[in-house]
Image (cartoon, helix red, strand yellow):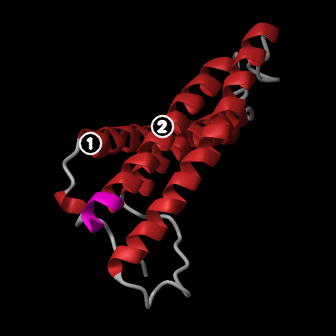
Amino acid sequence: MSMQAEPVAADRSPVRLAATLVAFVGGLLSFGIAVLVTVSVLMRWLLGMPLPGDFEYVQMGTALVVFCCLPLCQIDRGNIIVDTFTSRLSPRAQGAIDALWDVVYAIVIGVISWSMVQGVIDAFRTGESTMVSQVPLWPALLVSTALLIFLVLAALYTAQRLLRSRS
């Protein structure tokens, strides 16, 4: 397994603190989704009808939860790392390779973020909404885009942290 730049618990940077806060909000949102599903199931059981559009809220909420947790996962080095060919390299070489891949990851997520920006603009212009509840999609897309941009910053932060700790 690749070496971490520094112990995760020792990282008290603003980026890590922000990522922790965002992940906490994602956890609260996850709890809210669980409550929504429970209420909908109880309504179906007791009243014979579910909460209208419950699946739409669950879909949007679940996407937001995932986007909320990705930056902290990146900072904590929680993504899957395949180190079959690099495990015998020096920690410095491993850190440099990991930093390179963090930059590649940031670039890919940056391209996806740009596409999301275009999607937000299109959804806003067209007034696209969910099918049952008629909730506009652009606010959820906008928050998702902001969270992806934060993920880009988190990936660049981890790359910089890896390079700095290996020099």
Reply yes or no: does residue 5 show up in magenta: no
Please report the residue visible at 26 percent of the width from the left and 42 percent of the height from the top: 17
**Image quadrant of residue 127?**
top right
Please report the residue visible at 60 percent of the width from the left and 46 percent of the height from the top: 107
Please report the residue visible at 42 percent of the width from the left and 67 percent of the height from the top: 96
How far is disc 2 from disc 1 in space, using C-alphas? Answer: 23 Å
The residue that mark 2 highlights is 32
Percent x, y of residue 161: 31, 56
Instruction: Name the image quarter holding the N terminus.
Output: bottom left
Amino acid on which the number 1 mark rests in the picture:
Leu
Q: In what element is the residue under mark 1?
A: helix
Query: Is residue 146 or residue 23 the one in the foreground?
Result: 146
Looking at the image, residue 123 lies above or below residue 15: above
Q: Point out the residue furthest to the front here.
A: 167
Query: Is residue 135 or residue 34 the one in the foreground?
Result: 135
Q: In what element is the residue under mark 2?
A: helix
Left-right relation of 125 to 7: right
Query: Is residue 100 or residue 111 the one in the foreground?
Result: 100
Percent x, y of residue 49: 74, 32
Amino acid on which the number 2 mark rests in the picture:
Gly
Image: magenta residue range? 163-167
